[in-house]
Image: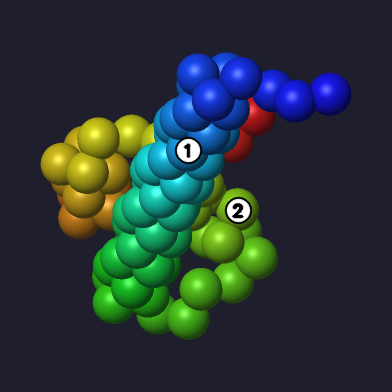
């Protein structure tokens, strides 16, 4: 069965468009993951500078801190004591 040139062209364009959208989505996801990882590293660094070695308790609050706006998480780390910060994110 011979397919029409118009159909073949449409199919090729649809394939390329789908491929391009997939690439764009993958790039967007990779950028977002990179930004999240960078935020976590920055928060871990701030916690280490402020409170010394990051123990299990402090490592547990990195993810919740990373969900806050950067300014808010920075203020919490700089203004609260270790105990207050841990209490802020417990239960």
Q: List the residue tagged with mark 1.
A: 16
Mark 1 or 2, nearer chain start: 1
**Residue 75 in which image quadrant:** top left
| Quadrant housing the N terminus | top right
Which of 79 and 23 lies nearest the eye of the viewer? 23
Residue at the image point whose x is 56% and y is 61% from the top: 59
Query: Residue lying furthest right in this view?
Result: 1
The CA distance from mark 1 to mark 2 is 44 Å
Q: List the residue tagged with mark 2.
A: 60
Residue 25 in view: no
Residue at the image point whose x is 54% and y is 25% from the top: 5
Can you tell which mark lies on residue 87? none
- Whole-percent x, y for residue 6 in the image: 50, 19
Query: Residue lying furthest front in this view?
Result: 2
Is residue 39 depicted above or below 8 in this figure?
Answer: below
Which of 36 and 82 lies nearest the eye of the viewer? 36
Q: On the picture, is 13 further left or further right than 15?
A: left
Query: What crowding class fits label 1: few (fewer than 14 Cα within 10 Å), some (14-19), or many (20 or more)?
Result: few
Q: On the picture, is 31 further left or further right than 88?
A: left
């Amino acid at each position: 069965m011979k397919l029409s040139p118009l159909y073949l062209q449409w199919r090729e364009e649809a394939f390329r468009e789908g491929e391009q959208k997939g690439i764009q989505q993958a790039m967007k996801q990779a950028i977002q993951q990179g930004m999240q990882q960078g935020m976590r590293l920055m928060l871990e660094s701030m916690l280490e500078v402020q409170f010394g070695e990051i123990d299990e308790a402090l490592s547990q609050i990195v993810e919740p801190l990373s969900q806050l706006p950067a300014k808010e998480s920075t203020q919490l780390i700089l203004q609260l004591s270790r105990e207050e910060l841990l209490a802020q994110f417990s239960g």
